[in-house]
Image (spheres, coloured by chain):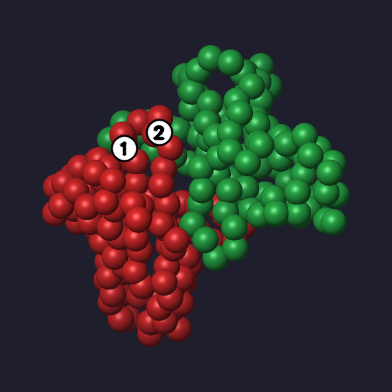
Chain colours: A green, B red
Amino acid sequence: AQSVAQPEDQVNVAEGNPLTVKCTYSVSGNPYLFWYVQYPNRGLQFLLKYITGDNLVKGSYGFEAEFNKSQTSFHLKKPSALVSDSALYFCAVRVPNQAGTALIFGKGTTLSVSS
Amino acid sequence: NAGVTQTPKFQVLKTGQSMTLQCAQDMNHEYMSWYRQDPGMGLRLIHYSVGAGITDQGEVPNGYNVSRSTTEDFPLRLLSAAPSQTSVYFCASSYSRDGNYGYTFGSGTRLTVV
């Protein structure tokens, strides 16, 4: 079955430290991978995507993600965390359906950055 | 402002009542979809549409109906509300059905069924 997993429910980091939010996937064919962020009482916002090309993808707010085909991972990273980065992060993967494709989402990881 | 607009933002229903969650986008997006978000379960796809007049079921379609009479609007109907439908509902749209351009999400509707 095609799926995406976020193994950590919560990640805690101190402000200024690097952060990593993990994501692994299982899909047939070449994966299209996405990261979204959700702030409290808001909808999801697109951060970045991997379609093809360079394995290191840069996105909004200083975030980046590294695609690793051998480990089927797409971890989200940031060199220096900010308190304002505290939010719920979702990894998503494109899967085929009757209409062509749809996005399926992981369960989400809460990132908490302390000052 | 361009984007996806969902109404209402909050709603409380009694078991058995029906209602329609509204979703409208002004970006001329072809693809629209409805997700529900439940704690610890992420987002699950309810229904989607690839254009006016074309809809199909997602992962959790039972108890919900949709229609797409125009490109802009994609309402979600709860036929007979049940407590299990208590959730936060998100509408999302995309320029293309393949997801290459990412999805634009509305701000959500928080529904409580008592």
Circles 1 and 2 on the same chain:
yes
Instruction: Name the residue rendered at 47%, 19% in the picture.
Output: A29
Amino acid residing under circle 1: Tyr
**Residue at mark 2:** B101
Query: Residue A18's mark?
Result: none
Q: From the top left corner, tell me how far across and down residue B55 is, in percent.
A: 22, 47
Q: Write down the residue under mark 1.
A: B95
Q: Nearer the viewer, residue B78 or B27?
A: B27
Name the quadrant containing residue B78: bottom left
Q: Element under label 1?
A: loop
Q: In the rendered view, does A58 fall on the left or right side of B10?
A: right
Report how far apart the C-alphas of labels 1 and 2 lie in the structure.
7 Å
Between discs 1 and 2, the one toward the N terminus? 1
Q: Does residue A22 appear in this view?
A: no
**Residue positioned 52% across, 31% down in the render:** A49
Mark 1 vs 2: CB contact within 8 A = yes
